[in-house]
Image (tube, coloured by chain):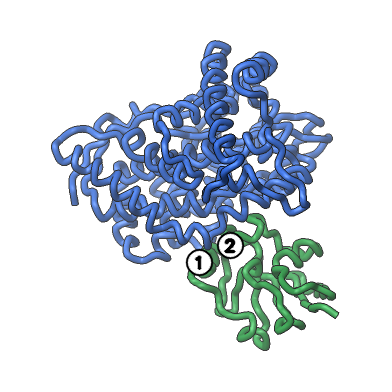
Chain colours: A blue, B green
Amino acid sequence: MEQAQAASPSAGKCPFTGQGAASLEGASLKDVMAHPNAFYQTLRSEAPVYFDAKLNMWLVSRYDDIVTVLRDPQTYSDKHGYAAMYANGYFEEFKQILERDGGGFFADAIKDDPPGHTRVRRLLENAFTAHRVATLEPGITRIIVELIEKLVEKGASGQVVDGVKDFAIPLTIRVICEQLGLAEFNADKIQAWSGAVTAQISKMQDREQMLGNAAQICDLQNFIIGEMKARQDQPREDMISDIVHAKLDDGSVLEFGEAVSLIRALIIAGNDTTATAIGNLMFVLATRPEVAKALQDSVDDDRLLNRFVEELLRIEPPVRGLAKMTTREVELGGVKLPAHAHLLVLYASGNDDETQFACPRNFDINRANIGKHVAFGVGVHRCVGASLSRMEIKVAAREISRRIADIKLAIPAEQIAYLPTVATRQIERLPITIKRR
Amino acid sequence: MGIKVTFVQADGVEKTIENIAPGESMMEIGRFNGVEGILGDCGGSCACATCHVYVDAAWEARAGKPDDVETSTLDMAPDVLPNSRLCCQIRLRDELDGLRVTVAPSF
């Protein structure tokens, strides 16, 4: 069996390589979900466009190839890549359940290809500009400080707290619900709905899980439709009302199903990946003292703090990989792909590409190309909520650093479990001990 | 009539666009007219720094300086200079008729 060698000339000099020999023979992302970096490195050096037989997908791992794919949405269709992923082989049954019990099956308007996508994208861009998000900082800070104070109180009494379930998840759910105008919400339900929706692109869902998740999504959609109806005749000052009554740039209005799908996407995408990022933040602070030190040194300087957030997103991106499908035969990374080839674009590997980021496992907020990472994607589907996400992570990092000391894992790092999904790398539970600073 | 602007691409090619109505952003004009290096991924939300330009000296005062939010986003981009702007934040008006910018190297 051939052993892969580290390709980067600087690999030997980097204190944190996260790399090692890994063989590609029969290898699958499915087998290395918790600790994939060595696998990514081998892919990049040995087989940058690699057919993963267990996933039945082509893995795209080099930064340049990832950007090529994301900049050409006509050749590499987001819509078809997503659809082929959805429900993991049980799509027809899944769709019937939603039509019967969930008000209908509503395809994701944000996962359309241009020009359909362009029509609705604009609406969301206007809602999440960096300038508008800047005005939300005081409100987001209030939510985060309140959660941290509760966490610290519990932690100070010697109890183990959960950085994901007690902090990251409730935090992002509260922020997005406030934006949407959901005054009354059940955070446990929203968390369950998020899991059910994201499981559809996990590639890991069996039929029994599909049935459970479909029931959750029906519940979610019925909730959304109820909230929409409440705003139909009496609009409020909130984002759901804006969507229900939206007029698009081309003069058209949103169809009912488009509106449901957008609100669904906002609830789920608005909390899930940002919570993952904040969970990762907690994990990194608990396990890498030099990162905790970098945060301490940055906390009172907004510019440094912003760079800290970008480097965190680069080194521990919430999104692992999203799907595309070729619409024609095309050559990518030296491999001839047929039409309808199903690709998994490994954003996390792009962020780890040593040809772009020197010593990629080093946490370095002084990188000259700090904004080059692809954690938010690139091109027309670039994350529309990036500014909101950055703000939540920044305020969380700042307030954690100011209010919490001695974050330590309460279980061995090897026992940290990640959700079974190829789409994200998401810590399920993060038991930690903390002290009040 | 209308406003005229010029982009100098990284490869030296100049693209002049005329008859622009006031109110459009410089990024929209660049992207719509296929100016190389003006990507505008975030659609003008000041979130991605893919519309980075250098404003010609003669136009710096009229184009104005970036505000705090734009400065933060610009900091993510490479090769930032004192005359750097994200051109999604330059809204065209009559006063900017003749504006000339050079497209910054992309990421």
Q: Nearer the viewer, residue A44 or B93?
A: B93
The residue depicted at 66 percent of the width and 57 percent of the height is B43
User: Which residue extends farthest front?
Assistant: A233
Chain designation of label 1: B
The residue depicted at 62 percent of the width and 53 percent of the height is A125
User: Which residue extends farthest bottom?
Assistant: B58
Report how far apart the C-alphas of labels 1 and 2 lie in the structure.
8 Å
Q: Which mark is residue A306?
A: none
Q: Percent x, y for residue B50?
A: 64, 61
Mark 2 lies on a secondary structure that is loop
The residue depicted at 69 percent of the width and 28 percent of the height is A83
- The kind of residue tagged 1 is Val
Q: Which mark is residue B69?
A: 1
Residue A73, quarter of picture: top right
Task: Inspect this view and state whether residue A3 appears.
Answer: no
Chain designation of label 2: B
- The kind of residue tagged 2 is Cys
Tell me the residue that label 2 is attached to.
B46
The residue depicted at 60 percent of the width and 73 percent of the height is B85
Circles 1 and 2: CB atoms closer than 8 Å: yes
